[in-house]
Image (cartoon, rainbow, N blue to C red):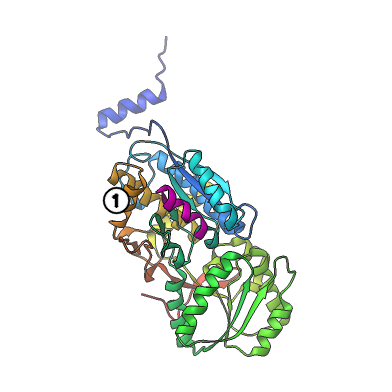
Amino acid sequence: MKLRWPTATITACWLALTGIAQAAPPAGDPITIGVIEDRSGAATFYSSESVKGIRLFVDMINRGEFLFAAGAVGTAPGIAGRPVRAIFEDDENNPNLTVVKTRRLIENGAQIIFFVSGSGSTLQGRIVCTEQKILCMAPTNVSARIVQPPNNEYVFTITPQSETASSVYIEAFRRLGYHRLAFIVDESATAKTVADAYRKAFAAAGLTSVADEQVEAGARDTNAQLLRIRAAGGDVMFDLIQSAPASANLYRSVAKLNLKIPRWGTNTITAQPKIWQLAGAAIDGLLVVDNLAPDNPNTNELKAAYRKQYGADAPFVFLQSVVWDALMLIKKAAETAGSTDGARLRAAIEATTDFPSSYGQKGNALSFAKDRHSGAGSKGNVIVQFAHGTPSVVWDVYQPN
């Protein structure tokens, strides 16, 4: 009779003979991350990209796949030997719902909260973080107000804030000789929050607003707004629209009217591949201060893992990178603190400096402090230009350092 050894037994024997340690799988009660997402509001298109990253990266944590971050977080699967799970609630990018949905996540066992809806929603949701003394991460939000008092004690951000990006735009506009700006924005709460920060920064730098147009929800084109912008005679049009359909309509209208004014926008555009698909070639030429550089090896390693799961042509945007960084920070903080207690996690992150990041220019790292709950720096920004319908060209005029 021929004996057949189970594959698992053969593998275990081989590992024992060769001296290679086999990491124990995570066990015990899971560490639960509650995620506030937007499935139906203005933030849907970029929130869904973040959620795809969270689902994959939680699985990778449980398998012990930490890529370049292994040097900082180790190789042990899970967090502190425990499995990680994610649970989700939809706030519809409605700040009035965010507080209710955040509390529901905590009632359902969430020990840590991730906000991946709009910045306006996170500003409300962070109130619960303070009330419940629970650690909250807002990895994808760009508003500096999120980490400013009040109610900022337990919330952290990863993406460069709009105020940090503002300095990059200001220097680029200075080099190009732009002084007169035309703004265009939609009526969402997030757009208002982000737009106010940019307006303030640009005004402080001496840039003049010659037009400030708003696009109503559901508008089929932006012809009227663009005609007023053309009549105002600005040097550059600055797109602050958050909705993917509205933003795509803008670029199709620009092409239809043959508007020649230079176009710049925010990383909301690079975060939403749906805009690129809907706008097509009309988006080519647009410049954006983004957060991904093609020569960053950490970015490319994470991109390869993401595309292995979602397909070789899956758009990889900065949202996936900052979600990954936030999860790696959670693992490091929880294992350093030996707890998921909000105050102890907060202290561990506040003591974290030079943490390896998966986004920005090569060598970009995250640093925090008691008075610094945004870990991003200027090297997290990269100016890119759209060509062939994607943000594929690194601008050769200027890059921040």
Q: For residue 23, what is the image quadrant? A: top left
Q: For residue 291, what is the image quadrant? A: bottom left
Residue extending furthest toward the top:
1
Query: Left or right: 140 with respect to 43?
Result: left
Residue under the image location 58 percent in, 62 percent down: 272
Magenta stretch, main secondary structure class: helix
Residue extending furthest toward the right:
220
- Relative to 300, say whether 382 is above or below: below
Looking at the picture, how far across and down is residue 331, in whole percent? 36, 46
Residue under the image location 41 percent in, 64 percent down: 149
Residue 372, magenta (yes or no): no
- Asked if residue 311 shows in the view, the reply is no
Relative to the observer, which residue lies in front, 237 or 291? 237
How crowded pointer 1 is (Cα within 10 Å; few <14, some 14-19, many 20+) is rated as: few
For disc 1, the marked residue is: 71
- Asked if residue 213 shows in the view, the reply is yes
Residue 134, magenta (yes or no): yes
Query: Left or right: 99 with respect to 377?
Result: right
Looking at the picture, how far across and down is residue 138, in whole percent? 46, 57
- Relative to 7, say whether 20 is above or below: below
Looking at the picture, how far across and down is residue 47, in whole percent? 56, 55
Query: Left or right: 91 with respect to 358?
Result: right
Q: Secondary structure at mark 1?
A: helix
Q: Amino acid at mark 1?
A: Gly
Query: Left or right: 264 with respect to 128?
Result: right
Q: Which residues are magenta?
A: 123-136
Residue under the image location 45 percent in, 54 percent down: 323
Relative to the observer, which residue lies in front, 289 or 186? 186
